Image: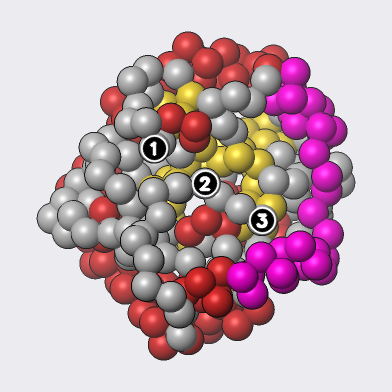
Amino acid sequence: MPPLPVLLYHAVNDDPPDWLAPYTVSRRTFADQLDALLASGRTPVTAGQIAAARTGGPPLPDHAVAVTFDDGYLDFLCHALPALAGRAIPVTLFVTTGALAPYNRSLLPDAAMLTLGEIVRLDAVGVEIGAHTHLHPQLDTLHPSAAAWELTHSKDILEQALGHEITLTAYPHGYSSRPVRDLARDIGYRAAFAVRDALSPEADDPYRIARLTVKADTPPAKFEAWLSGTGAPVAGARERALTLGWRCYRRALAYLPRPSSADPAESR
């Protein structure tokens, strides 16, 4: 089975806030990328189908591709979903529950966000919903009890609102560690999505599934290379030394008083 491109978007907007602009694609660019996806001959699948395939369920079709969104910005409903629905491309939305109305509290900077009621309606029309914690912290820098609360609370809110189990989560910033991944499994998630900016192999860790971040400056040639199964590394089984060092640095910073980051960028 060839490696799988799992595309990660944040926002689709022609006039995003400055802090979000690097991780926002324009409406025209998004439409062009979806057209390229369909022209590539790949079969769009959901994150849930990937989770099933990575945990012993039905295999994915050859040359699959997945579209995912993180956080829950309002432009998903206004701009992204119409373009996806018009092309019959399924999508998975990982929601930061604390950023939604009526909560309106998270570590994300101010932006126009979806409401919990709109998440309910999106679920009803077939958008696959997953959790993305409640406050959007760096989970691998938290005490285990705080990390468990983040993973559990977002799951509970969504399950109560939607009336069905939430089995998928995505780590804010893509950050996880072995203890965080163990928590996600023990709490009841079937799979969890990271970033890693890599293609996901058939043997990918189901609690660290690799994704590719689509940014404002992602060139069309690179996007098309991802669709061809090239243009990015294939995720390995072991964490890189750079990842481990970056985690140690961030954990040290977590003990220092500092303003919350305005950068929503996902990382390896």
Residue 268 can be seen in this image: yes
On screen, residue 174 versus residue 42, left or right, reads left
- Residue 131, quarter of picture: bottom left
Q: Nearer the viewer, residue 28 or 62?
A: 28
The magenta segment: 221-249
Query: What's under tag 2, amino acid-wise?
Result: Ala
Residue 268 has which mark?
A: 3
Q: Distance of mark 2 from mark 3, alpha carbons? A: 10 Å
In depth, the one of 206 and 133 nearer the eye is 133
Residue at 52% in and 61% down: 171
The local crowd at label 1, few if under 14, some if 14 to 19, many if 20 or more residues have their Cα within 10 Å, is some
x, y percentage for residue 238?
82, 68
**Helix, strand or loop under label 1:** loop
Q: Amino acid at mark 1?
A: Trp
Residue 246 occupies which quadrant of the picture? Answer: bottom right
Q: Is residue 50 magenta?
A: no
Q: Quick one: label 2 or label 1, which is nearer the N terminus?
A: 1
Q: How many marks?
A: 3
The type of residue carrying mark 3 is Arg
Residue at left 79%, top 26%? 225
Query: What's the residue at 55%, 75% (across, down)?
Result: 251
Q: Nearer the viewer, mark 3 or mark 1?
A: 1
Can you identify the residue that label 2 sits on? 265
Of labels 3 and 1, earlier in sequence is 1
Q: What label does residue 19 carry, if any?
A: 1
